[in-house]
Image (tube, rainbow, N blue to C red):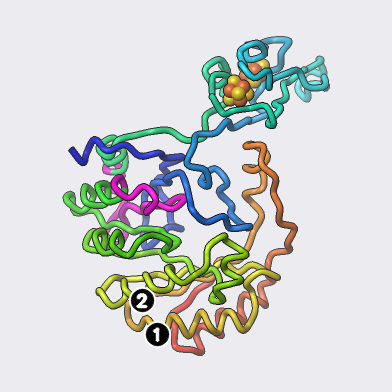
Amino acid sequence: MTRDIKGKLYDIQGYSVHDGPGIRTTVFLKGCMLHCLWCHSPESISFDYELAWFETRCVGTEKCGLCLDVCPQGAISKAEPEKSATDGSLLTKIKIDRSKCRNCLICTQTCPAQALKPSGYEATVEEVFRKVAKDKIYFGQEGGVTISGGEPMAQFDFTLALAKRCKEEGISVCLDTTGYAPWENFQEILPYIDLFLYDLKHMDPDKCQKLVGVNNELILDNARRIAQNEGNLQIRVPVIPKLNATKENMEKTAAFCRELGNAVTLVQLLPYHSFGSAKYTRLGLPYKLNITPPSDQEMREYLELMQSMGLKAQIH
Ligand code: SF4
Ligand code: SF4
């Protein structure tokens, strides 16, 4: 039964106004084949479940300490004591040696404060559908469900089944994708997707390879084929100073969007931000970028460039 297909998720967020038209509920799947330097959802990159560490929730080993002896790798130990901000008493939290941690998640079962938590969980298509369908009342004319990630096409059977299930119930479906998946899969899912939220990260194949780990040939080819097959595309362009934010790249991006014709309903420019850096700390991953976000002026220039080439565009 397709409704029993299991997917690996890391979140479901209701009442989203950033993931397609109207009010939407977004299903975030784990795992991505690309590795964008600026990724603000590091929990979406790995296909495996990971240990997330919420330091502020730890009540201290003086009161708890339940996790100290459970790690088979010996990765958990006491941190340096600090003064509690609430009553000035001594508070000794834990620290995790990530070089030893194997993400077995045993420690997450012991922590009563949910300071140690699994990042990611498994759910069937039907379980996810039942959850998102509860929000139907908010969707109105424009809204619906967005399947995002990670790269949802990497868990194709789950994504296809969930899209079909939503459409059976008359719920609009957006698919937020990098475009990096076999065309045959896009062709199969196309009838169930109202709008593809489609990322264009760099128009130069070599630079794209360097920035995200794959070149853009398949991505551009799939966009062309979606357009030829009457799919709708909302193009999303991250604007990352020093990496892809050049006049030349934005002009080439705009020219490509023009080539796709009426299939492109909107071009969204997404200014770089570093809000996701705390999530890297939580997962024990390094945050490698040290970049200043683009200025309002720079964003306006790129917006005007897109509009001057006849595209409906906005800063997101
Ligand atoms: S998830 Fe990591 S820290 Fe926790 S018990 Fe397993 S190996 Fe140890
Ligand atoms: S079990 Fe949780 S609350 Fe208790 S010491 Fe460990 S991390 Fe802190």
Numbered disc 2: secondary structure = helix
Stretch of the chain drawn in magenta: 133-158
Q: Residue at x 44, y 88 (%)?
A: 310
Instruction: Say whether residue 280 is left or right of residue 29.
Output: right
Q: Which residue is mark 2?
A: 224
Q: Amino acid at mark 2?
A: Arg
Q: Residue at x 28, y 78 (%)?
A: 228
Q: Residue at x 75, y 58 (%)?
A: 290
Instruction: Say whether residue 25 is left or right of residue 58.
Output: left
State the image coordinates of residue 73 (x, y, percent, origin top left): 64, 19
- Asked whether the residues under the numbered discs 2 and 1 touch, taking CB atoms below 8 Å apart as contact, a structural biologist would say yes
Residue 256 seen by the camera: yes
Residue 287 is covered by the magenta coloring: no
Q: As displayed, is residue 30 above or below residue 37?
A: above
Q: How far, Cα to Cα, is label 2 from label 1?
A: 8 Å
Label 2 environment density (alpha carbons within 10 Å; few <14, some 14–19, many ≥20): some
Q: Which residue is mark 1?
A: 259
Which is more toward the observer, 6 or 167?
6
State the image coordinates of residue 311 (x, y, percent, origin top left): 44, 83
Numbered disc 1: secondary structure = helix
Q: Residue at x 68, y 31 (%)?
A: 98
